[in-house]
């Protein structure tokens, strides 16, 4: 097999992946205001995650006991966040069997322990707010960020039902054109801004759950850098003192 043939094959494989990257780049992601130092937001996000996500998605690398880091006591976790029969020291698993998940959704819902590190906070925040009614899908739902997704809209009662409609838009130059936009067709229990806040809190918790020790890691990193800077100065003066007679 010649070198030229291998180069041609590599180039073909490289250019074949370009449409996928272009499609991903076309998706405009909304910024998620992540603040791991906001315990109230993290507590609200944990409550939403456990009440709405944990029925189908597991978080097998996360224990309920880690919620004490968010300012909750073990008794508060037991009273408000544990299902019957579960203990504080257990991991966040689901009772749904994989065979049932495949039958109902066509695939096993992924574990969400590190989903924020995999997808990114902005992607998750946008995804949670871009579900819309689509009768052609088995679940009756679709998503502009993840087209043909098998997941139903678990937060539908809170957000309401959106529809993808063609609307007339006028740009800054005064030119009119049509775009597909999501329109709230059926209001939910929360106002749009309230739902955005709930989605932001949920994403904030997912980011925390993906690396609970991130704040500690960053603090230790800063202390280590200060120590190395101080050690460098001391080593520099020691070097000068040691070599002064030599030079």
Image (spheres, rainbow, N blue to C red):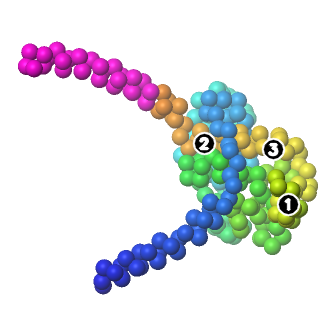
The crowd level at tag 1 (other Cα within 10 Å; few <14, some 14-19, many 20+) is few
Q: Which of marks 3 and 1 is nearer the N terminus?
A: 1
**Residue under numbered circle 3:** 195
Q: How far apart are the two marked residues, 2 and 1, measured between alpha carbons? A: 41 Å
Q: Is residue 101 left or right of residue 181?
A: left
Could you tell me which residue is drawn at 53 percent across and 70 percent down? Answer: 17
Badge 1 element:
loop
Identity of the residue furthest to the left in this view: 246
Query: Quick one: quadrant of the N terminus?
Result: bottom left
| Disc 3 versus disc 1: nearer the observer | 1
Please tell me the numbered disc located at residue 175: 1
Q: Judge whether residue 178 can be spotted in this image.
A: yes
Could you tell me which residue is drawn at 64 percent across and 26 percent down? Answer: 71
**Residue under numbered circle 2:** 207
The crowd level at tag 3 (other Cα within 10 Å; few <14, some 14-19, many 20+) is some
Q: Earlier in the sequence, mark 2 or mark 1?
A: 1
Badge 2 element:
helix
Q: Judge whether residue 84 can be spotted in this image.
A: no
Could you tell me which residue is drawn at 66 percent across and 61 percent down? Answer: 26
Q: Give the residues drawn in magenta, as a range.
A: 220-247
Q: In this view, does 174 lie above or below 216?
A: below
């Amino acid at each position: 097999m010649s070198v030229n043939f291998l180069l041609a094959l590599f180039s073909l494989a490289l250019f074949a992946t370009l449409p996928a990257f272009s499609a991903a780049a076309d998706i405009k992601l909304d910024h998620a205001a992540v603040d791991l130092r906001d315990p109230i937001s993290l507590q609200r996000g944990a409550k939403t995650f456990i009440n709405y996500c944990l029925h189908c998605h597991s978080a097998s690398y996360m224990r309920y006991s880690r919620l004490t880091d968010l300012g909750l006591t073990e008794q508060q976790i037991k009273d408000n966040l544990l299902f019957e029969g579960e203990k504080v020291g257990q991991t966040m698993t689901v009772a749904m069997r994989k065979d049932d998940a495949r039958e109902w959704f066509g695939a096993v819902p992924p574990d969400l322990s590190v989903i924020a590190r995999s997808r990114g906070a902005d992607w998750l925040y946008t995804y949670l707010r871009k579900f819309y009614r689509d009768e052609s899908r088995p679940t009756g739902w679709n998503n502009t960020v993840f087209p043909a997704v098998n997941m139903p809209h678990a937060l539908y009662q809170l957000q309401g039902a959106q529809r993808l409609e063609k609307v007339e838009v006028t740009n800054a130059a005064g030119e009119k054109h049509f775009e597909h936009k999501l329109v709230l067709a059926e209001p939910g229990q929360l106002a749009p801004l309230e739902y955005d806040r709930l989605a932001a809190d949920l994403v904030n918790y997912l980011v925390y759950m993906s690396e609970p020790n991130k704040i500690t890691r960053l603090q230790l990193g800063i202390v280590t850098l200060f120590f190395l800077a101080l050690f460098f100065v001391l080593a520099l003066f020691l070097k000068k003192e040691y070599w002064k007679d030599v030079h």
